[in-house]
Amino acid sequence: MKIWHKIKKKFTYRVLIGILIGAAGGFAYYYFVGCQSGSCPITSNPWSSVFYGSIIGLVWTLK
């Protein structure tokens, strides 16, 4: 039973770190690349860039 709790803890931390790295990557993409005209639906808003980046980080960690 203790082993299951250790695996569950590692899995949770791994997923959270992946989400945070993805969110940071999404914000970095918004900041450095972005969209000057405002017509890009993802990169024109920092919140949407962070959201999509965190989703990508989640998908990578669940792989």
Image (spheres, helix red, strand yellow):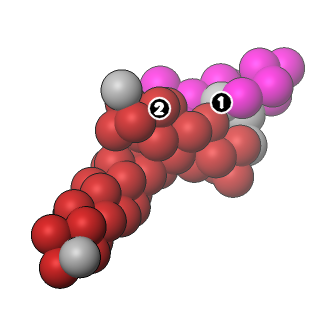
| Residue 28 can be seen, yes or no | no
Taking the spot 34% from the left edge, 38% from the top edge, the residue there is 61
| Residue 15 can be seen, yes or no | yes
Viewer-side residue, 15 vs 40: 15
Task: Return the x and y of residue 47 as percentages of the image width and height.
Answer: 69, 52
Q: In which quarter of the image is the C terminus?
A: top left
Taking the spot 64% from the left edge, 46% from the top edge, the residue there is 51
**Residue 41 horizontal side relative to residue 29, left or right:** right
**Residue 9 horizontal side relative to residue 31, left or right:** left
Task: Return the x and y of residue 56 as percentages of the image width and height.
Answer: 49, 32
Taking the spot 37% from the left edge, 53% from the top edge, the residue there is 15
Residue 27, placed above or below residue 17:
above
Question: On the image, numbered disc 1 is attached to which residue?
Answer: 43
Taking the spot 25% from the left edge, 67% from the top edge, the residue there is 4
Question: On the image, numbered disc 2 is attached to which residue?
Answer: 59
- Magenta region, mostly helix, strand or loop? loop
As helix, strand or loop, the secondary structure at mark 1 comes to loop
**Residue 8 horizontal side relative to residue 30, left or right:** left
Q: In which quarter of the image is residue 48?
A: top right
Viewer-side residue, 7 vs 35: 7
Q: What residue type is labelled 1?
A: Thr
Magenta region: 30-42
As helix, strand or loop, the secondary structure at mark 2 comes to helix
